[in-house]
Amino acid sequence: MADQSLQEKIQNASMWKLMLTLSLPSILAMSINGINTFVDGLFVGQLVGQDGVAAIGLAFPLTMITNGFAAMVGAGASSVLSIALGAGDEDTQKRVFGVLTMLCLVCGGLLTLVAGYYAENLIAFMGGEGEVLRLGTIYYRITLWGAFFRIFGVAANRLIRAEGRISIAMGMTIVATVMNMVLNPILIGYFNLGIGGAAWATVLAMVLYSALDVWYFWTGRATFPVAWRQWRLDWNFIKPILSVGASAMTLQIMFFVQQAVVFKSIAYYGGADDQAFMGACYRVVVLLLLPSFGFSHALQPVVGINYGAEKFARVKEAFSVYAITNVGVVLLIVVIALFFPETILRWLLPDMAFTDQHLFNFQMMMSSLPLIPIFLLGGVFFQSIGDAKTAGILVVSREVLLYIPSILAMPLIFGLDGIYFAGIPVNIIFFFVTGGLVWRSFRQWKVSPSPQPIG
């Protein structure tokens, strides 16, 4: 597809048709990626045991630190690129890939050295003890060897999505994810690497992911020019990338903080079985929310390119269409999960004896998930228009002001079960808060013909 044709479709095609065209491959890739996370837990549960599930459950929030750097560089660079594409700014288009690569090298190197050194302390901080601590440290330390490849692979792939080529970007994601799923049983079982096999499968998949990204840009398949001799840390580009990307990173880091509080609370009120159960629940949450992440990724180029071209009515229409569809899809999936909780949990924890309270806690944890898409879409919306301040405030206020206090307060009333209820009031409140902030942007645009981001 020609560059001009692609941008014309994003700016002029039927929004419902465009939403389906961009979202379906994104949702497919995200779903396969989520199934991969689920499969990781499945193979570890079946081949390593319940301690293994608890170990990767403790390590999983720590991987959000790596994902945070990937989100920061990727979201910031993709926002800068999309606006540059809409505005026809070729100089920015040429230089964004080189700056992205250098930032990934710096972030990946620092994370491998620092987090690798403190890996055991971090797993212990999450609540790991005994065999769970040992297995969690092994798993997390190995995944850090692939930190650069994860950060670069995800960030560079977001550039491809930012130009509107969702199908190509997601095709690469699918290839890397399938490789991870294939390698899991081979490395864990056949080569008898145990939990380390699951970690090495992830690292090798990220190496492939990065290689596919490099191949795409090196062979000139991008719809924007790449200056291969301008790979340097230029502050004029770093500043907007980091300012916008900071909110995306904050979301990941706040997820880590939230998980740390959750698992510390689980360790305080419960035991290893409870850690394994919560780890399984979170993997299901990630699986059920994957369509929402897919819609969010597909929304980014539509908002960014149209905002750069000053087609503000088009931006409003895009958010409305994506929001209605996203909430509807997640609601349907969650209803299915609510009716078959034990069947789903049994795949991850085949040997656990589930009580009625276990299943009720799982259902309560899932019940408010259909409200989360508005929060996720809102974050992407503000990142895409370059409104770093509102995007950051939205994330921090949700996690620091409401979620973490809720996690700490609920067990005081309901005991261990209260941890599973903590998200319900938070998700309800931020459904309205996010919607209100987005609507405020729309109203501001009515006042000024050339609106600037709020704040």
Image (spheres, grey):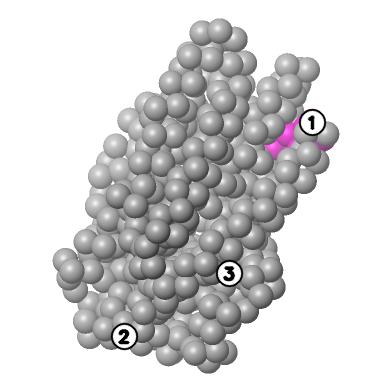
Categorize mark 3 by other alpha carbons within 10 Å: few (<14), some (14-19), many (20+): many
Q: Residue at x 58, y 63 (%)?
A: 317
* Position above or below: 437 against 442: above
User: What residue does disc 1 label?
Assistant: 342
Q: Is residue 178 visible?
A: no
x, y (%) of residue 237?
A: 23, 69
Q: Residue at x 61, y 22 (%)?
A: 421
Q: Quadrant of residue 353?
A: top right
User: Which marked residue is nearer to the observer: mark 3 or mark 1?
Assistant: 3
User: Which marked residue is nearer to the observer: mark 2 or mark 3?
Assistant: 2
The magenta segment: 340-349
Q: Amino acid at mark 3?
A: Met
* Position above or below: 32 against 266: below
Categorize mark 1 by other alpha carbons within 10 Å: few (<14), some (14-19), many (20+): some
Q: Is residue 279 left or right of residue 250?
A: right
Q: Are marks 2 and 3 in contact (CB under 8 Å)?
A: no
Q: Amino acid at mark 1?
A: Glu
| Camera-side residue of 82 and 178 | 82
Helix, strand or loop under label 2: helix
For the image shown, how many numbered marks are present on the structure?
3
User: What residue does disc 3 label?
Assistant: 170
